[in-house]
Amino acid sequence: MTREIDSKQITDAVKKLAVEVNTKLPEDMVSALNKALKNEESPVGRDLLRDLIKNAEIARKENLPICQDTGFAIVFVELGQDVNIKGENLVGSINEGISRGYKEGYLRRSIVKDPFKRDNTGDNTPADIITEIVTGDKIKITLMAKGGGCENVSALKMFKPNDPFEEIEKFVVEKITEAGGNPCPPIIVGLGIGGTADKAMVLAKKALLRKVGAHNSNSDIAKKEKDLFNKVNATGIGAGGLGGRVTALAANIETWPCHIASLPVALAVDCYAHRVGSTIL
């Protein structure tokens, strides 16, 4: 049986999410930063981690942005096949919510209309909307506000089908080492493996959505996550790129079937201001 949802509900939910993710660091991230503080041996790294934790506390208490870069709004939608949206269409409803949230929440607007002319859209739209049709009569909306510094570390490489995972690890470590402090570590590493080139990039961003500390349900993939996590932290980049044991708080991998001739690997990185939130309508 079809369930009707007014598009205004979607707009209101996205508006609320836009403000919440930018001002309230998720509890799993706060816990991960506190754990990192216990594990870090570098005095400078420990001082910076304390500052990041304090910054998150102030942002939550004062309802202020965690970071001055309030990100590109990336919206993941799980749309139930039995949902009928009344009023504005899905994309329009989401973009209206982003627009209102960023304007009314006094969040920095960072999106330009044209990649060459660089004129600001004025309301942080359009959002990057990734939609998946699922069973049921509900809509799950997940918003990730992704900063420019960490987005600039994104990378894609088409490996040979028989390349070992060690080559993939080498690729990731090289990219993260080159980036140094630019993505504002400690970071979350997301890896998408399989599919096509564009599918791999979506998988990599989806990998970032997982709770810190949660591993892939496939035990072989989970082991690869742990190995990659250890290798990234062995770089010694540390918090803020100032050196230390803690460069990454998590390394997550998502996979997908791929062509016999291909092995696409995409890297996505998110910063310490890992701003993610979800709601279900």
Image: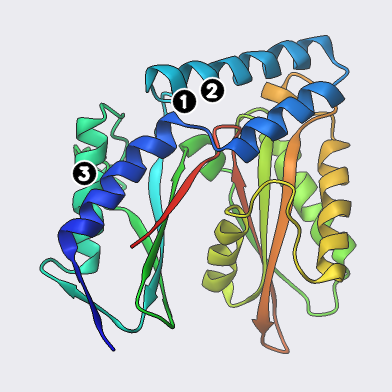
- Residue 269's disc is none
> Of the residues under marks 1 and 3, which one precedes in the sequence?
1
Which residue, as the protein is rendered here, is positioned at the far front?
A: 1
Q: Is residue 216 left or right of residue 65?
A: right
The crowd level at tag 1 (other Cα within 10 Å; few <14, some 14-19, many 20+) is many
In the picture, the quarter occupied by the N terminus is bottom left
204 is higher (above) or lower (below) than 247: below
Tell me, yes or no, whether the two marked residues, 1 and 2, touch with CB atoms within 8 Å: yes
Mark 2 and mark 3: Cα distance apart in space: 24 Å
> Which residue lies under the disc numbered 3?
99
| Type of amino acid at the residue the image marks with label 2 | Ala
Mark 1 and mark 2: Cα distance apart in space: 6 Å
- Residue 56's disc is 2
Residue 11 position within the rendered picture, expressed as x and y whole percent measured from the top left: 22, 53
- Residue 66's disc is 1
Tell me, yes or no, whether the two marked residues, 2 and 3, touch with CB atoms within 8 Å: no
> Of the residues under marks 2 and 3, which one precedes in the sequence?
2
The residue drawn where x is 18% and y is 51% is 96
Is residue 11 shown to the viewer in this render? yes
Residue 74 position within the rendered picture, expressed as x and y whole percent measured from the top left: 41, 53
